[in-house]
Image (spheres, rainbow, N blue to C red):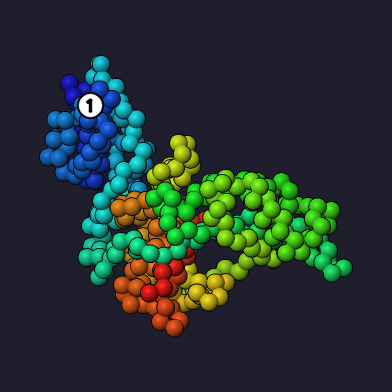
Amino acid sequence: MVNDLFPFSTLRRYAGVKLVAWENCAQDIPESRRACRRSFRSRSDIATLLGIWDRLWIGPSHCSRDAGGVCSVQHRLPLPPGRSWAPAPRCHALPRTPDLERCTMNSPCEADPAAGPLPNGWLPGLPAGGTYTIGKRANCDIARTVDGIDGSDLVTVELVLTATELTKPGFVCDFGDLSGFQQHVDQVLDHQDLDTILADPTGAGIVAHVRAWAQENLPDDVRQLLDDVRVFTGRLPDPAADEAVRFRARHWLCDLPDGHKCGRHHGHAYLVTLPDPDQPDNLLPVPGKLREVVLSRFHGQVLNTVFDFNPTSEHLAAVLTAWLVEQELTAVGGRPFTVRVSETASTWSQFTLEAA
Ligand SMILES: Nc1nc2c(c(=O)[nH]1)N=C([C@H](O)[C@H](O)COP(=O)(O)OP(=O)(O)OP(=O)(O)O)CN2
């Protein structure tokens, strides 16, 4: 009967990969809220799974066969009459699983013989004291006159927010809370002649305009975190090769409102840089050991399986800062590095350890 509902041939397709399932998730089972994660790998595991199949939720939402490390069945099992499915557990802390099969974005899971023990001290955990800073950028193409000369250009406006305590796990505030900023720049400044819109169309005038908008329009709790408004003129240069580590990885974020796009399983082309603590617009060369650890441990991975915390860019910046300290790698003057992690062209997060 079980085989009719969920043919063994279907299961066999997954026999070589790690199968993740959550037990006790059916709505009519009292302990369903305690989503209990189980892994099934071998044929005999799958026999066990068949034995308890009607108590399983097998999750389609976050993992896929090529997801990197954790793979799960893509469809729900049919239920016997009278049983109903609970909603999929949206977020679950997966344990750190360094020895999982490593999957690249383009190839199916296969064991990586080179994946030895994790580098010494990895992961150090999240540091206790320090400052988290996030930035959200919006671009506008503008015409203007500055000192009687044409000053038309591409202008990037950046909101900078700072916190020493994260409000929700991993967030200074959700970048989504700043979406009104992007809309304002798009609607009011972008593709406009600023001479007709602002009393002062220079960088200082744009900063004053955006600061006033932010004071009036950001949600109260977000406004309190606003530290700076910055304006850059012209195309921003790409960091030099030795000043950045680029990696691609997948994740989903917990503690976001229902329907938020970042709660879905998605991926980013990440950029890790080390701003000079004295001159944040200058980047320091990335130590080879940091490059190595980021590429070997993050690239092509599902970050939720690498960390046992919400893999926001703030958290990534913080653990990398802590790791550099643990490795005794320091910035100019022997000070701890500040690490910046950027998920998208318009967002970044960085962490600076509290001065000892
Ligand atoms: N404080 C944080 N908030 C969010 C993070 C984060 O790491 N820290 N991450 C995300 C998502 O992963 C998302 O992909 C990036 O955020 P988003 O604002 O949506 O950035 P975009 O560049 O895609 O901006 P759009 O204005 O939506 O184009 C969410 N929040």
**Quarter of the rendering occupied by the C terminus:** bottom left
Relative to 301, residue 352 above or below: below
Relative to 81, residue 210 above or below: below
Point 62% across, 66% down: residue: 236
**Quarter of the rendering occupied by the N terminus:** top left
**Nearest the eye: 138 or 21:** 138
Residue farthest to the bottom? 333
**Nearest the eye: 261 or 335:** 335
Q: Examine the rendering and report whether any part of residue 207 can be seen.
A: yes
> Looking at the picture, which amino acid does disc 1 mark?
Pro
Count of numbered circles in the view = 1
Q: Mark 1 points at which residue?
A: 30
Could you classify mark 1 by the number of other residues whose Cα lies within 10 Å: few (under 14), some (14-19), or many (20 or more)?
few
The secondary element bearing badge 1 is classed as: helix
Point 55% across, 53% down: residue: 224
Point 33% across, 77% down: residue: 328
- Counting from the top left corner in percent of width and height, residue 155 is at 69, 61
- Counting from the top left corner in percent of width and height, residue 339 is at 44, 67
Q: Examine the rendering and report whether any part of residue 111 can be seen.
A: no
- Counting from the top left corner in percent of width and height, residue 58 is at 28, 34
- Counting from the top left corner in percent of width and height, residue 213 is at 68, 50
Point 26% across, 20% down: residue: 83
Q: Does the residue labelled 1 lie within 8 Å of ligand 1?
A: no
Left or right, residue 202 beside residue 94? right
Residue 60 falls in which quadrant of the image?
A: top left
Residue farthest to the right? 148
